C-alpha cells in the first residue's frame, strides 16, 4: 500500500538546476553547453539504471532547447528541419524508427541538422538490441554512464531540501523514506513537499510519527477513491 500511496505524489518539474549532480559533473557540464549552443559534442548517449535521472536530464534539456522529448516506444520520423533531436528509452525503438534515427545521425555527421542528438537508455550501446549500423553511430559519439546517488548522498540531499523549507529531518525519518518509497529524487522531493504541507495542516512538527499518520491518511483517501470509481 505504501507504494500505491507514493504513486499519487507529484515530483517537481525537472530542470537542470534541481538535478542532484553527485558524480555526474561532466554530464551536467555538457548539457549546460548544449543549452547554450556552445558544445563541440554533437552526439551524446546517456545510460544507467532506472531511477538514476535519465528522463529528468532529457526533459530538462528539451525544455531549455524548446524541443520535445521523443520516447522510443512512439513512432519517430526524422525531418531535416529538426534542429535538435532528443529520444528517451531508445531500446524500445522499432525497426522503422531505428532507420529514421540512423538517417538523422548521417545528416548530422554531414554537417546538416540536427545540430545535437541526445539519447538515453539503460544499457551501454554495445549491449543494445539495435541495428548494428545504428549502434556504431551511437558509439561514435560520446557515451556516458549516469552514476546514481548513494544512500548517503540522497540523505544529504533530503536534509538540504528540508532545510531550505525550514524543516529538520531526523535520521530515522530519512532511513524510513529510503526503505519504503521510490528512491528517485523526484519522488523523494515530492514526499518532503507533501509532508511539509501536512505538517502545516496538522500544526505538528515533521517527524516519523507524522509521516506514518500522513501515510495512513493518504491510504484511506486512495481506497475511498478506488471504491468510488468501482461504483
Image (tube, rainbow, N blue to C red):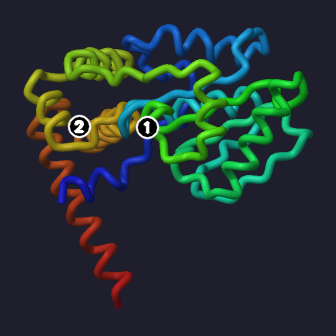
Q: Is residue 215 visible?
A: yes
**Would you place residue 190 above or below residue 159 in this image?**
below
Res. 57 image quadrant: top right
- Relative to 9, is 13 above or below? above
For label 2, the residue is 203
Q: Residue furthest bottom?
A: 231
How far is the residue under mark 1 from the one under mark 2?
Answer: 52 Å
Where residue 162 sits in the image (x, y, percent)? 31, 22
Residue at the (69%, 11%) spot, across then down: 33
Left or right, 221 with reference to 53: left
Q: Secondary structure at mark 2?
A: loop
Q: Earlier in the sequence, mark 1 or mark 2?
A: 1
Which of 138 and 147 lies nearest the eye of the viewer?
Answer: 138
- What is the number of the mark on residue 2? none
**Badge count:** 2
Name the foreground residue: 133 vs 45.
133
**Horizontal placement of 189 versus 107: left or right?**
left
Amino acid at each position: 500500500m505504501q507504494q500505491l500511496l507514493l504513486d499519487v505524489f507529484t515530483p517537481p518539474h525537472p530542470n537542470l538546476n534541481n538535478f542532484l549532480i553527485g558524480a555526474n559533473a561532466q554530464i551536467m557540464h555538457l548539457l549546460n553547453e548544449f543549452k547554450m549552443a556552445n558544445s563541440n559534442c554533437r552526439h551524446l548517449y546517456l545510460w544507467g539504471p532506472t531511477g538514476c535521472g535519465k528522463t529528468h536530464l532529457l526533459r530538462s534539456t528539451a525544455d531549455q532547447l524548446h524541443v520535445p522529448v521523443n520516447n522510443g516506444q512512439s513512432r519517430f520520423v526524422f525531418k531535416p528541419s529538426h534542429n535538435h533531436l532528443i529520444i528517451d528509452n531508445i531500446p524500445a525503438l522499432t525497426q522503422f524508427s531505428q532507420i529514421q534515427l540512423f538517417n538523422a545521425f548521417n545528416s548530422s555527421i554531414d554537417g546538416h541538422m540536427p545540430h545535437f542528438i541526445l539519447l538515453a537508455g539503460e544499457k551501454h550501446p554495445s549491449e543494445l538490441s539495435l541495428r548494428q549500423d545504428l549502434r556504431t553511430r551511437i558509439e561514435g559519439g560520446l557515451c556516458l554512464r549516469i552514476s546514481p546517488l548513494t544512500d548517503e548522498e540522497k540523505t544529504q540531499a533530503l536534509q538540504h531540501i528540508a532545510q531550505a523549507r525550514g524543516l529538520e529531518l531526523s535520521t530515522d525519518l530519512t532511513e524510513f523514506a529510503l526503505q519504503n518509497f521510490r528512491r528517485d529524487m523526484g519522488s523523494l522531493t515530492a514526499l518532503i513537499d507533501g509532508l511539509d504541507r501536512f505538517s502545516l495542516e496538522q500544526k505538528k512538527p515533521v517527524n516519523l510519527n507524522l509521516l506514518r499518520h500522513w501515510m495512513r491518511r493518504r491510504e484511506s483517501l486512495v481506497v475511498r477513491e478506488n471504491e468510488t470509481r468501482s461504483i
